[in-house]
């Protein structure tokens, strides 16, 4: 049996599955909600099975099979587009860079400035992304290059079809108010803060909570902060509301009201990479941006 799919229907399915909402998918794609519903209905008619459950909006096994196939097609087409662009070896075109927030606010701007100065004809697009979505966005062809990270104690494999290169190591620091008794210490351990008010950060709870290295940091969590922005946590520390684990990369322009203390026993290190599609050829503009990112990272 041969099924003929309209590629637009698969893109619509992907948006519905990711956003878990027909209305949100319609807004993102520039369609009416009725048009999205009609496309999904047409796709289900051609497949002969439901691809999306409506309440709640979740993909079925048939829908997931289609999404897996669509992801493979998108990755293949993205690799072809990248290799064709590399053949031209020009300095025009565009570069779409994805980066997590602390990289986007530190090493990325100087690197992009160098690219703009050297090649003003290149259109630059920057997207702040959560680490969890970066690899998929590369494989789908939504971005050309990304700054990604993992942790030394918890390395993450790179999905097939992608290649990454190490940029820098970014140690995690204990950040305390400048008035804290340990603010002048050369280094500290987590056990030095058994009764302090720890401010929750993405380092604490998303990446390290299950690690046996961390142990018990006491029960002094007097501030319940639920957020992903390291800068907010940094400002909370500066206001004297507690202490936090934060990456050194964030601290290059830290406010005067905080002190950053190196950790020992254990050291916790975040590793940064550039990541892109694994292709035979790479456009000149992407190669140059990779170089500028590496050179900028060396200065931090």
Image: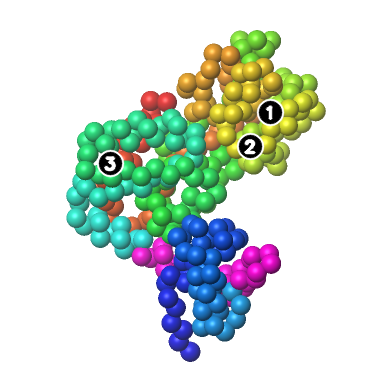
Residue 286 appears in the picture as rendered: no
Vertical comparison of 241 with 227: above or below: above
Measuring from the top left, give residue 286's x and y in whole percent.
Answer: 30, 46
The circle drawn on residue 288 is: 3
Residue for point 69% across, 21% down: 242
Dot 2 or dot 3, earlier in sequence: 2
Judged left or right of residue 17, residue 218 is: right
For label 1, the SS is loop
Residue contact between numbered discs 1 and 2, judged by CB atoms under 8 Å: no
Alpha carbon distance from label 1 to label 2: 10 Å
For label 2, the SS is loop
Vertical comparison of 268 with 187: above or below: below
Residue contact between numbered discs 1 and 3, judged by CB atoms under 8 Å: no
Measuring from the top left, give residue 284's x and y in whole percent.
Answer: 24, 47
Q: Residues within 10 Å of mark 3 (few under 14, many from 20)?
A: some
**Residue under circle 2?**
227
Q: Nearer the viewer, mark 1 or mark 3?
A: 1
**Residue under circle 1?**
199
Dot 1 or dot 3, earlier in sequence: 1
Residue for point 58% across, 14% down: 257
Q: Nearer the viewer, mark 2 or mark 3?
A: 2
Dot 1 or dot 2, earlier in sequence: 1
Q: Nearer the viewer, residue 248 or 63?
A: 63
Q: Nearer the viewer, residue 175 or 119?
A: 119
Measuring from the top left, give residue 62's x and y in whole percent.
Answer: 59, 75
Q: Which residues are magenta?
A: 52-77
Q: Residues within 10 Å of mark 1 (few under 14, many from 20)?
A: many
Residue for point 19% across, 55% down: 88
Judged left or right of residue 271, residue 82 is: left
Measuring from the top left, give residue 166's x and y in whole percent.
Answer: 42, 40
Judged left or right of residue 205, residue 8 is: left
């Amino acid at each position: 049996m041969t099924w003929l799919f309209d590629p637009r229907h698969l893109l619509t399915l992907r948006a519905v599955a990711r956003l878990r909402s027909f209305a949100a998918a319609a807004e993102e794609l520039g369609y009416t909600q009725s048009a999205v519903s009609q496309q999904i209905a047409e796709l289900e008619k051609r497949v002969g099975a439901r691809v999306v459950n409506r309440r709640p909006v979740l993909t079925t096994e048939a829908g997931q099979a289609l999404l897996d196939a669509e992801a493979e097609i998108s990755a293949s087409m993205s690799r072809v587009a990248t290799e064709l662009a590399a053949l031209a070896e020009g300095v025009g075109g565009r570069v779409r860079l994805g980066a997590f927030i602390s990289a986007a606010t530190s090493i990325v701007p100087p690197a992009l400035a160098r690219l703009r100065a050297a090649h003003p004809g290149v259109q630059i697009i920057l997207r702040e992304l959560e680490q969890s979505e970066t690899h998929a966005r590369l494989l789908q062809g939504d971005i050309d290059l990304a700054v990604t990270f993992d942790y030394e104690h918890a390395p993450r494999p790179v999905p097939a079809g992608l290649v990454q290169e190490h940029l820098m190591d970014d140690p995690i620091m204990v950040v305390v108010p400048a008035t804290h008794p340990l603010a002048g210490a050369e280094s500290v351990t987590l056990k030095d803060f058994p009764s302090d008010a720890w401010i929750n950060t993405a380092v604490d709870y998303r990446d390290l909570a299950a690690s046996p290295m961390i142990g018990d940091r006491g029960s002094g969590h007097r501030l319940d902060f639920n957020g992903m922005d390291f800068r907010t946590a940094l400002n909370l520390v500066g206001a004297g509301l507690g202490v936090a684990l934060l990456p050194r990369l964030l601290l290059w322009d830290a406010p005067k009201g905080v002190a950053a203390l190196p950790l020992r026993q254990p050291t916790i290190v975040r590793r940064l990479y550039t990541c892109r599609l694994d292709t035979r050829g790479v456009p000149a503009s992407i190669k140059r941006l990779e170089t500028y990112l590496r050179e900028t990272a060396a200065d931090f």
